[in-house]
Amino acid sequence: MDRQVFENLSEKTGFQMDILEKVYRLTELLKEVVETELMRELVLKGGTAINFVYFDVPRLSVDIDLDYIGSVRKKKMLKDRAALEEILERIFRILDYTAEEDRTYALQRYNLLYENSAENQDRIQTEINFLKRLNFRSPSFFPDMKG
């Protein structure tokens, strides 16, 4: 997206241009994740989820936090995790991110590096928690996110 778009939006909203671009990129990334076959295995949580879904983005959250909820069974989780990693890495390539990966048993973290419209290096952090597979409540799904 053109830098001028972010400058104009910054003047209207009072948010910094680089943060606006990061949020734009974050929403583009989430749209791609929603389109995947394993989308129902993940739930969005934290500040991004609250802002986008409930509060019409009154403050800008600049990372993506997901929980894997596909199965409490370890064997299925490990199989799905491998598939998710493949899918995410493909999405990162399509969106032209350089992914730095940090992996533990519980957490898969990606720092997605990119050059923003001001030609500065920036990043988006994406985390998937594979340990919290059982929720107290059923997740809410928003089918209109696909549009």
Image (spheres, rainbow, N blue to C red):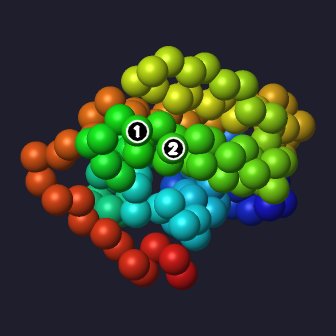
Looking at the image, do the residues carrying marks 1 and 2 touch, with CB atoms under 8 Å apart? yes
| Residue lying farthest to the right in this orientation | 119
Query: Residue 128's x, y, as percent?
Result: 46, 37
Residue shown at the point (23%, 59%) measured from the top left: 139
Nearest the eye: 26 or 79: 79
Q: Is residue 71 above or below residue 38?
A: above
Q: CA distance from mark 1 to mark 2?
A: 6 Å
SS assignment at label 2: helix
Does residue 47 show up? Answer: no
Nearest the eye: 104 or 95: 104
Amino acid type of the residue tagged 2 in the rendering: Lys
Residues packed near mark 1 inside 10 Å, few (<14), some (14 to 19) or many (20 plus)? few
| Residue lying farthest to the front in this orientation | 75
Q: How many marks?
A: 2
Task: Say whether residue 22 is left or right of residue 58.
Answer: right
Query: Residue 20's x, y, as percent?
Result: 61, 49
Nearest the eye: 76 or 91: 76
Residue with the mark numbered 2: 79
SS assignment at label 1: helix
Residue shown at the point (66%, 52%) measured from the top left: 87
Residue shown at the point (45%, 21%) measured from the top left: 105
Quarter placement of the C terminus: bottom right
Query: Residue 144's x, y, as percent?
Result: 42, 80
Task: Say whether residue 142 is left or right of residue 119.
Answer: left
Does residue 23 show up? Answer: yes
Amino acid type of the residue tagged 1 in the rendering: Lys
Residues packed near mark 2 inside 10 Å, few (<14), some (14 to 19) or many (20 plus)? few
Residue with the mark numbered 1: 75
